[in-house]
Image (cartoon, rainbow, N blue to C red):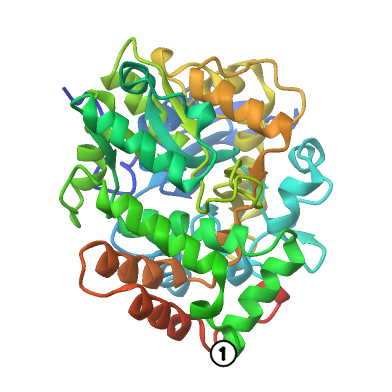
């Protein structure tokens, strides 16, 4: 039974009332005479939309100077397609949350340098949001993606996820699960999963250092990179075909796919699902009493090859504050809300508290956190991070809109409309001539 899954809209609007108030105290102790409304486009993500809005509600009721309001966007449009007409109408939201579009927004948003949150975040976590020395955003959390698994299904099949080190090991595990009467894997045909996350496996493992990965992006933009001749890409393609072969479900390209896949893993119909830890709250809600874990997706038969033993960990998005159309009071309110969320005991409980208690179960990324996640998967991710078994979210550097194109091509591949060579050709064409935003080039 689904208790709460994905909502249709980017977010529901909060009921907000602007009301005059007697002089009160702002977050920094200054007096205020009226409440200032602070708008935010959407929320962090739909999976924990209700939990985030509960935090907004508590913040709004905690003080008398600011009122945060989440305003809905259009879910079928990209972030830029949503926000561009808002700027054109002089109605830009004060708080925005995104990832790949950060370079496009850098000249419109405030510099977080010197703020409390920027000081509490690690330098590495701020790297993707630092443009020409300006910190244009602050991180929300760390997330991870890889092979999620239902521990009870794997235990019944005699599969030890810690023993899976190669692609052949993974196929053996798939066969064992099928022999136990369960489906091996639900391989989702979601465009964003295929376009942003599955492709990240290749781009993150294409080189062992950050500069080497950026050089791969350079080669694709210049038209000098031949994916067919890259053994890492060929291993990645073979892994795609392996998951496709053992996929227990018919590829579903509609909005119902995420819910269907989630329930398949939660109910124990399949052993694995390629997805991220953002699904854990809904898995726990719908599969009470079951442990759901995460493990690396090995893409080659060399256990020692770079990245085979690691999960993808990164920052899924950054908060930015408009600096063109907002007032100083609105910007102060935006900073006050986000600082409250990540530094006060009440806010931290919403951020890192348990799903069962209606919280977001985020992995903390700011120092000084006193609330720690308690779930099975969150603990595993922490162990991977501590052991250095993580690979980069190089998808952070994809050009805006790129993951949509790669996702569309991935859907053709998973449904058998194109083969691997045709897929490689489509990916190369999608990259050719794009602005190298990862090198600081501007989109014209």
Considering the image in quadrants, where does the C terminus appear?
bottom right
Percent from the top left, x then y, of residue 72? 34, 50
- Image quarter hosting the N terminus: top left
Asked if one can make out residue 223 in the rendered structure from this viewpoint, the answer is yes
Tell me the quarter of the picture where residue 54 sits: top left
Residue under the point 50% across and 18% down: 376
The residue that appears at 36% across and 23% down in the rendered structure is: 154
Residue 274 visible in rendering? no
Query: What residue is pinned by disc 1?
Result: 223
In the rendered image, the residue lying farthest to the top is 289
- Where does the image place residue 98, in percent across and percent down from the top left? 52, 55
Does residue 177 appear to the left or right of 119 in the view shown? left
Q: Name the residue: 39% across, 13% down.
A: 356
Residue drawn where x is 76% and y is 23% of the image: 368
- Which residue occupies the foreground of this view, 242 or 179? 179
Mark 1: few/some/many CA within 10 Å (<14, 14-19, 20+): some
269 and 141: which is toward the camera: 269
């Amino acid at each position: 039974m689904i208790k709460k899954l994905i909502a249709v809209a980017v977010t529901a609007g909060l009921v907000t009332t602007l009301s005059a108030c007697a002089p009160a105290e702002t977050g920094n102790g200054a007096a205020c005479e009226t409440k200032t409304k602070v708008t935010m486009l959407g929320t962090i993500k739909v999976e924990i939309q209700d939990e985030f809005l509960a935090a907004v509600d508590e913040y709004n009721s905690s003080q008398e100077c600011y009122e945060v309001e989440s305003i809905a966007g259009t879910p079928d449009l990209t972030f830029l397609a949503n926000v561009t007409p808002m700027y054109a109408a002089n109605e830009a939201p004060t708080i925005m949350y995104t990832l790949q579009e950060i370079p496009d927004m850098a000249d419109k948003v405030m510099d977080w340098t010197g703020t409390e949150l920027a000081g509490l975040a690690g330098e590495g976590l701020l790297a993707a949001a630092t443009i020409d020395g300006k910190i244009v955003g602050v991180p929300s959390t760390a997330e991870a993606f890889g092979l999620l698994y239902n521990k009870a299904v794997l235990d019944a099949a005699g599969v030890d996820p810690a023993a899976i080190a190669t692609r052949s090991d993974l196929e053996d595990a798939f066969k064992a699960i099928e022999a136990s009467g369960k489906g091996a894997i639900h391989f989702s045909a979601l465009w964003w999963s295929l376009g942003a996350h599955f492709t990240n496996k290749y781009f993150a493992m294409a080189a062992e250092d950050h500069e080497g990965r950026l050089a791969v992006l350079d080669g694709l933009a210049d038209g000098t990179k031949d994916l067919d001749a890259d053994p890492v890409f060929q291993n990645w393609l073979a892994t795609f075909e392996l998951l496709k072969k053992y996929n227990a479900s018919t590829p579903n390209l509609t909005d119902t796919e995420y819910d269907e896949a989630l329930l398949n893993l939660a109910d124990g119909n399949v052993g694995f699902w390629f997805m991220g830890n953002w699904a854990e709250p809904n898995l726990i809600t719908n599969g009470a009493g079951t442990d759901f874990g995460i493990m690396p997706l090995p893409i080659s038969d060399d256990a020692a090859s770079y990245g085979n033993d690691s999960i993808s960990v990164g920052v899924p998005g950054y908060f930015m504050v408009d600096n063109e159309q907002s007032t100083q009071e609105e910007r102060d309110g935006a900073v006050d809300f986000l600082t409250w969320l990540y530094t006060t005991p009440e806010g931290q409980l919403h951020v890192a508290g348990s799903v069962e208690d209606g919280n977001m179960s985020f992995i903390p990324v700011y120092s000084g956190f006193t609330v720690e996640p308690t779930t099975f998967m969150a603990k595993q991710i922490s162990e991977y991070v501590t052991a250095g078994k993580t690979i980069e979210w190089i998808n952070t550097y994809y050009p805006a809109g790129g993951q949509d194109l790669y996702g569309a091509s991935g859907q053709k591949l998973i449904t058998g409309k194109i083969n691997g060579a045709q897929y490689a050709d489509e990916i190369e064409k999608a990259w050719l001539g794009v602005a190298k935003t990862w090198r600081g080039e501007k989109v014209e």
